[in-house]
Image (tube, grey):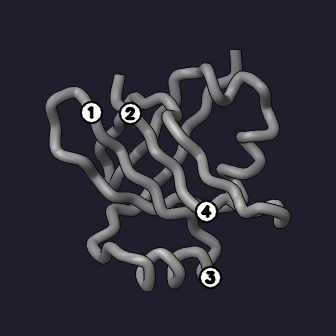
Amino acid sequence: MTEFTFKADAKADTGTGASRRLRKAGKVPAIIYGKDQAPVTISLEHDKLLHATENKTFFTADLTIDVEGKSESVKIKALQRHPFKPKLLHADFVRI
């Protein structure tokens, strides 16, 4: 089975403007939540995440996200895509 590991940056800014700036910089805004811990807003590299979604096991596999040195084990909960461009707009991850 394929291992999926991503490096992420913690994101301090929230809102539509901040998300637009991230997308223009080639990143995808995302959130990690669940397991009685506070939600963490992050940003991931767009191209790496897009290529991972081409693998059919991505949506059922346990993913590892390294958020500034702290490793989180997660599953994908929701993924928002652009209606006609091959672009990802937002991702939701839930801790396992």
The answer to the question of whether label 2 and label 1 lie on touching residues, with beta carbons closer than 8 A, is: yes
User: Between disc 2 and disc 1, whose residue precedes?
Assistant: 1
- As helix, strand or loop, the secondary structure at mark 4 comes to strand
Whether label 4 touches label 2, CB < 8 Å: no
> Spatial distance from mark 4 to mark 2, Cα to Cα?
17 Å
Q: Earlier in the sequence, mark 1 or mark 4?
A: 1
Identify the disc placed on residue 13.
Answer: none
Amino acid type at image mark 4: Leu
> How far from the left and from the top, in percent, is residue 93?
44, 39
Q: Which residue lies under the disc numbered 2?
A: 94
Residue 24 % position (x, y): 62, 82
Residue with the mark numbered 1: 34
Residue beneath label 3, please?
24
**Looking at the rendering, which quadrant does residue 16 occupy?**
bottom left
Q: Nearer the viewer, mark 4 or mark 3?
A: 4
Label 4: which residue?
89
